[in-house]
Image (cartoon, rainbow, N blue to C red):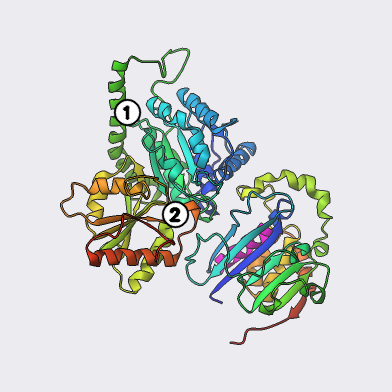
Amino acid sequence: MAYTELTVWTRGIIMDKEGRDIVNSIAASARNEGKFAQAMENYVDNPDRTNAPTRKYCRISDSEIENALTYENENPNIVVLVEQTMVKGWDYMRGMPPGGTLVINTQYTPDYMLRFVPKPERLAQLVCVDAAKLADHKWLYYRLGELGLDRLSTEGAAERSKAIAPDIAAPLIAAVVKTTGIVKMETIEPMIANKAAFKAALKELHIMPLNPVTA
Amino acid sequence: MATATAGKKKTVRINGCVASAQAAKYADVDVIAAYPIRPYTATMMALAQMVANGELDAEYIVADSEHSQLSIAHGAASCGARVFTGSSGVGVQFAFELYSPISGARMPVQMMIADRTLDPPGDFGSEHTEALSTRDMGWLMGWSCDAQEAFDNHLMAYRIGEDPRVLLPQMVCQDGFFVSHITTDCELPDPGQVKEFLPPYKHPYPLDPRHPVSHGPQIMPEQGPPLQLERARAMEGAMPVIEEIHDQFARIFGRRYDPWLEEYMTDDAEVVFFLQGAHGVTARHAIRHMRARGAKVGMVRLRTYRPYPTEQVAASLSKFKVVGVIETNMGLGSVSSGGSLYAEAVAALYEVPKRPLVFSFMAGMGGEAIVMKEFYWMTNKMIEAQKRGKIEKRAHWVGFEE
């Protein structure tokens, strides 16, 4: 693909870094591969509030990105839901061209999740990965106090933790990269802090093939 | 007083807000006066972390409002400190009372502005109206179009403003979101380069109990004219200094900016966009596409707004047949019923024998991105005016007309 858009839907504050790590690491890998890439947060979702839905964007292109100043990804080819309950009630499929990929962090199967997806006929595949389990993730709310204090992150100005994908972002990045080939495995893997979860995820993806786009 | 962390030249991927904070760090500021408002907030967050981590030794004062923020900046500068502050949107306006006293006292305070639309209604998007409304308060002022230019402008503004021939405060402006929250590559220099370019700041008459001086006293009316004349002369006198400092910057850092105007594909252009700030980035792409279709279109981007480069604007814009001013600011009830950039562009052209047709495009209001097809539409409007030989109207609202 000459131009790809990836949109990540996540929860404010508690999963903010996870969402940001996905777009930042994939954009950085693409740049390392010599492509043009941009990662950014949705400007009007920020400053985020705890649990409020927030979006993060990544754009990858073989040529210079001319819509760099456009606020939102209008036609996401790949959508990631960092938290499974977002599958209902949000219009995350809006603008997706046929042949898209949806990745969900969930313990459920694609069979079960598909019923909640609006306009699933645009999907070439639905990918479910139990990222929380693979990352040996403590129940998020135990960490709420710590994460709630990390307001520094809300504008992307500064990170308290410099590690990329130490937590549930790692399996999600593995799922995106393995099922879409958006960047090469060997360029992204060295960036990932939680290598165990990244590698485990590669073997534990639940992929449901749907409607491929015929060339 | 303060010491920046040492390190060699490196290229990083950062947004405009962080670039501004980095520039303040490299400039080794002594006092930071902060008060949160988006999109500037990210700059104060980044600086807070630098101070907390010991990367920057500066007094970090969180004020109770923008008015206090600028008052603190004024006071600190009076004591001889290098001061960094910043704001956005309504915050810029809440501090309005301080702008004239700071430039009148000839305090080279630096203020980062990440533009935000004024209320109503509440909007995070970028419009230049808030900073432009302070344009006649005696502050040097100019816009950047990406993180690197923002970083560079901050360093140059300190050097210009602190020059003993100038001694004026500076507003270093960048579009909210389009620059402030979009990451681009930014080369952070070797601290040695910055040391060579920007010597430690020394105000000639700081407040010091050992050498008492008066700052900002009440004066008699007859003392007003000479003081105002001096401030006006400082602004005019800044022009050769600005050129000199841009030369020095290019020599030391290897990046050369025209101090006044960036011209893009203007060599054989007949119609040009005249604008400032980030929309110049999209304009460049649109111009390349329009040229591929045969339109002789170019862009003139204003880099310095105060002092206004009257001669340079006249010399540049008079080369073309039609000038479309992309405003991204509100000049309600102004001469064009559009924005405020139009009036000064037209005034600068008044004495030119062969004037182009000039009109405003009201685009990007509320911080809306100006997209490619809008640039195409605007180009067509300019070409139509060129064929007709006269303007259709002084201000077009892009997206609301056929």
Residue A158 showing in the rendered view: yes
* Residue B52: quadrant of the picture: top right
Q: Which residue is mark 1?
A: B231
Instruction: Decide if residue B237 is on the left or right side of residue A122.
Output: left
Q: Residue furthest left?
A: B353
What is the distance, in whole Å, between disc 2 and disc 1 at their CAs?
30 Å
Report the residue at 63% width, 51% height from top.
A46
Q: Residue furthest bottom?
A: A214
Chain holding disc 2: B
Q: Which residue is mark 2?
A: B278
Q: What is the magenta range?
A: A19-34
Q: Does the segment drawn in magenta span residue B295?
A: no
User: Magenta part mainly helix, strand or loop?
Assistant: helix
Instruction: Decide if residue B281 is on the left or right side of residue B248.
Output: right
- When the figure is inspected, residue B215 is found, relative to residue A158, above or below; the finding is above
What's under tag 1, amino acid-wise?
Arg
Residue B183 tag number: none
Mark 2 lies on a secondary structure that is loop
Residue A101's spot in the image, x, y percent? 68, 74
Report the residue at 69% width, 70% height from top.
A176
Residue B202's spot in the image, x, y percent? 42, 27
Count neighbours of disc 2 (C-alpha within 10 A) and say few if under 14, some if 14 to 19, many if 20 or more: many
Residue B10's spot in the image, x, y percent? 51, 52
Instruction: Decide if residue B110 is on the left or right side of residue B247.
Output: right
Residue B330's spot in the image, x, y percent? 42, 47
What's under tag 2, amino acid-wise?
Ala
